[in-house]
Image (tube, rainbow, N blue to C red):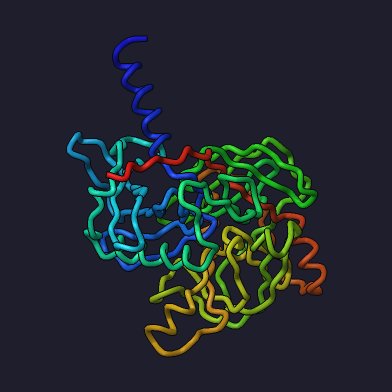
Amino acid sequence: MNTLASRAAVACAALLLLMPATTPAVEWRFLTAPGDFQSMVDMDSVTSTQGVQRFMLRRAFNTPQALPTGQIYRSMRLHYVGDCTSGKLTAGLTAYYGDDRKLVHSEQRTPLRRSEFSVPDSSDVAEALTIACQRIAQGPPATPGAEAKPAPKPVARGSSSGSGIIVSEGQVLTNHHVVNECDAHEIIDGSNAVHKATLQISDTQRDLALLSVDKRFANVARVRSDTTPKLGEAVTVVGYPLVGVLGSSPTVGFGHVSSTTGIRDNPSQMQISVPIQRGNSGGPVFDQAGNVIGVVVSKLDALKMAARGGDLPQNVNFAIRGEVMRLFLENNQVNFPVSRSNTKLENTEIASQGAAVTVRVRCVRRPAVPVAVTPQ
């Protein structure tokens, strides 16, 4: 093995040893951060073993960032090891990801010593540590020197789950954030059959992504010819939320378009009153004729809004508007069916047709090896 290859092998081995034993972000918790990046903590990465606490923090930047080496990155993951008692911590691993969501650079510290732990150097890290310690305090106490037993997950270890729309015989549309930074992708259909998928294109700005699937689907979603949402029109959402709680069958929700724009009058989104849960992201929004007019994208954090405004909002959720979705599909040469039908269907018909063109999207990440911390 030549010197360069040898160094690469050693770096990869060190990288794995430093990474905590996490499952990826089935549950993200957004943090207070400056306007130039978005920060969040992966709640499923929170563990307490060997007398220390671990969690992973992700920062997604609004504009490309440059490392001193000249390498460009758009997001970073910081794997922290800390002590809830002292409120101190250190980053054992910092990984940088580029446009293709591939690792472009990493910085690791080994061995890690308690004497090197320090107070958080930024507000989002301090908030993440507080949240992680609160999560750990809610569970059973950790046994020093023993690995914490992970809670059962609704999907395979190292994976997160969302929803998707069958837009052609072999292609599925979903959200960018559902398939972001995955080692592999899978599509699970209504019969719970698992199919391999390949990421064709992912648009960060529109939060849309297109997957190619090694299966030919018999049913394909119809996109309404006039995708402009109508204020007050009835809509139906189909998806796979909270799989571990609600089961592996698709669920259906009914509501209406409560605003034709999104947060802060975002023209690329619309507000819907349909209840949305984690896992609905990427799923279709249907009109009364069973045509797709949008893609579910997010729900409003009711607790944060209550803390800021003193009121608890109900069913304030958002979807990407059909015009944005349609432009994305057209730009990527997807041959999707368009419908001009405005014949109203029964709710049961919309639900049945919607379930036939909605699938579960699974983002698979490889599990990692936990890090050892010396007491010095």
**Residue 264 falls in image quadrant:** bottom left
Quick one: which residue is furthest to the bottom in this view? Answer: 310
Provide residue 30's location: percent of width, then percent of height. Answer: 41, 65
Q: In percent of the image, x 68 and y 71: which residue is there?
A: 236
**Residue 71 falls in image quadrant:** top left
Q: Is residue 237 left or right of residue 125?
A: right
Q: Nearer the viewer, residue 280 or 116?
A: 116
Q: In percent of the image, x 32 and y 68: which residue is there?
A: 32
Q: Is residue 198 left or right of residue 89?
A: right
Query: From this viewpoint, is residue 180 visible?
Result: yes
Q: In percent of the image, x 69 and y 76: which residue is there?
A: 254
Q: Is residue 262 left or right of residue 76?
A: right
Pick the quarter of the image with the N terminus.
top left
Q: In percent of the image, x 47 and y 63: which residue is there?
A: 136
Up-down relation of residue 342 to residue 241 (above or below): below
Up-down relation of residue 152 to residue 290 (above or below): above
Up-down relation of residue 335 to residue 270 (above or below): above
Provide residue 292's location: percent of width, then percent of height. Answer: 65, 63
Q: Nearer the viewer, residue 161 or 64?
A: 161
